[in-house]
Image: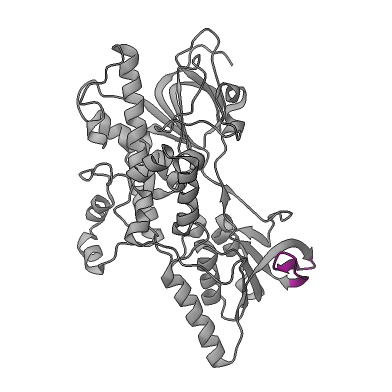
Amino acid sequence: MSDRGHEIYDVVGIGFGPSNLSLAIAIEEYGAGGPGNGISSLFFERQASFGWHRNMLLPSATMQISFLKDLVTIRNPTSSFSFVAYLQASGRLPQFVNKQDFFPTRREFHSYLEWAQARVSDRVAYGSEVTSIRLPAGEAPDHLLLEIADDTGRRMVGARNVVISTGLVPSLPEGIDRDERVWHSCDFLEQYRRMNPRILRRVAVAGAGQSAAEITRFLYDELPHAEVYAVIPSYGYSVADDTPFANQVFDRAAVDDFYFGTEQTREAFWRYHRNTNYSVVDDEVIRELYRRSYDDDVLGVRRLRFLNLTRVTGAKRAGEETRISLQAGEDGEVRELDVDALVCATGYRAMEPAGLLGDLDRHCLRDEAGRYQVDRDYRLVTVPEVRCGIYLQGGTEHTHGLISSLLSAIAVRSGEIVESIVSRRVGDNVDGAVPAEAGSDLR
C-alpha cells in the first residue's frame, strides 16, 4: 500500500470503549466552542457494534461509581452528553431521583453509553482493526500512518495524533486455558447462555474481586439445583473502601500528586489505597452472599461453599466434566474437584501497546524498569524526530496511578488530552503561545 493518497485526521482513536467515547465527546464539545475550533477525528473499533463488558451485565449488578462520574460531568457539568441528560431524554429523570441512589445498574449505564455513542457514531468505524502504526517515508513527518483492516480489505489513514485505548487484557491463572467449560469473566454471560442450565450441577468461581462475587451470587440464584464453589485466595472477600477521603485518590489533584511524587509517594498510594479498587467487593454484595450462606446453614443444605485461602492451579477435561486442581495456601496439599464449569474472575492485565506500535516502539522512551515514559498529559515521550502525538488511555498505572484504567477518570482525562492536542497544535503554528480560551470549555 502506498503512503500517498490517504486521508489525514487531527486525531485517530484506536478502540472505542468508554474512554475514547468520552474523548470523541470532548472533541465535539471543543469544536462547538466557536469557529476555528474544529478537530477532525476518526475512531476505529474491532467490535461490530458498541459494547462495554456486555458479558457482565448481570441483572442485579450496579455501578461502583456515582452516576456523576459519567462520560462528561466532572469535566463539563452542563454537557448534553451527561447521564442526567440521558435520563431526561429517556423520560426517567424523576423516577431516578425518587430512587435516592447514586449507583445505577450496570445495564442502565450501558444503555447510557449506547445512547451517547449513537450521537457521535458518524466518526466511528466499527468492524475495523488497526493492524499497525508507522512513520511515513521522509524527514520529520507531521503525521503517522495507520493500516486498517475491515471487511472491504486494507487501507491507510493518516493521523497527527493517535489515542490508543484498546482496553484491558483478560488474565487467567498460569497454565489454564479457556474452553467451553473454562471461562473468563469477560465471556461469562455468553458462555453461560450456551449451556443447558440443568447440566450445571457443580460450578466453581475463582477470584476475590467484585466480578467473582457477582458471578457467584448470580449462579447461586439462577441454579437452585447446583452447588456453587467460591475459590478465594484470601480469607473471604474484602470490602471496597469507597469512603469520602479514600475516594479522593480518584480526583485530578491526586493524579498530580502521584505523577509528580517520589517513588516513596507512589508506593504509599498503592499500599494504602489498593483496596479502593483491586480484589475488593461492595459491602452490599458481601452481605448478600453471607446471608445466602447462612440461610443454607439454617436449612441444613450446603449449596454455597467458600474455599478460602485457596487457588486454582490447574484444569483439565475429565469426560464431560472439568477437573480443577486446588491448592490451599502457598505450600498446601493439592486436591482435585470435578465441576461442570469453572469461571475465572481473575482480573486483567494492563493495556500494552508495544505490539501495535511495532517498529515505532523504538522511538518511544522507557524508564529504567523498561516501562514507557509518559507525560502528564498521557502522551508517550518520544524521540524529537517524532512530532506526532501518541496518547494512552490505559497502561499508565506506573505514571498516573490507580485511576489509569478506571471509569472515574475518563471525563477529566479526555479533556486533558484534547487540551494537550490543541495547545501543541497552536504552539506549532504561533510561536508556542496558547490563547487563553484554548480548551477552556474542557475543564
- SS majority, magenta: strand
- Quadrant position of the N terminus in the picture: top right
Find the residue positioned furthest to the top.
Answer: 139
Q: Is residue 127 left or right of residue 199?
A: left
| Occupied quadrant, residue 34 | top left
Find the residue positioned furthest to the right.
Answer: 319
Residue 14 vertical position relative to residue 305 in the rendered view, above or below: above
Colour treatment of the image? one colour
Residue at left offset 47%, top offset 38% = 399
Find the magenta span and give its range.
318-337
Q: State how many labels appear.
A: 0
Residue 88 among those drawn in magenta = no
Q: Is residue 76 left or right of residue 411?
A: left
- Quadrant position of the C terminus in the picture: top left
Residue 169 at what x, y percent from top left? 58, 46
Residue 390 at what x, y percent from top left? 47, 27
Residue at left offset 46%, top offset 40% = 262
Residue 320 among those drawn in magenta = yes
Tell which of 202 and 345 is nearer to you. Answer: 345
| Occupied quadrant, residue 416 | top left
Residue at left offset 53%, top offset 92% = 298
Residue 263 vertical position relative to residue 329 in the rendered view, above or below: above
Q: In this view of the protein, can residue 52 be seen by the observer?
A: no
Q: In this view of the protein, can residue 4 be seen by the observer?
A: yes
Residue 139 vertical position relative to residue 376 in the rendered view, above or below: above
Residue 272 at what x, y percent from top left? 46, 56
Residue 88 at what x, y percent from top left? 22, 54
Tell which of 413 and 229 is nearer to you. Answer: 413
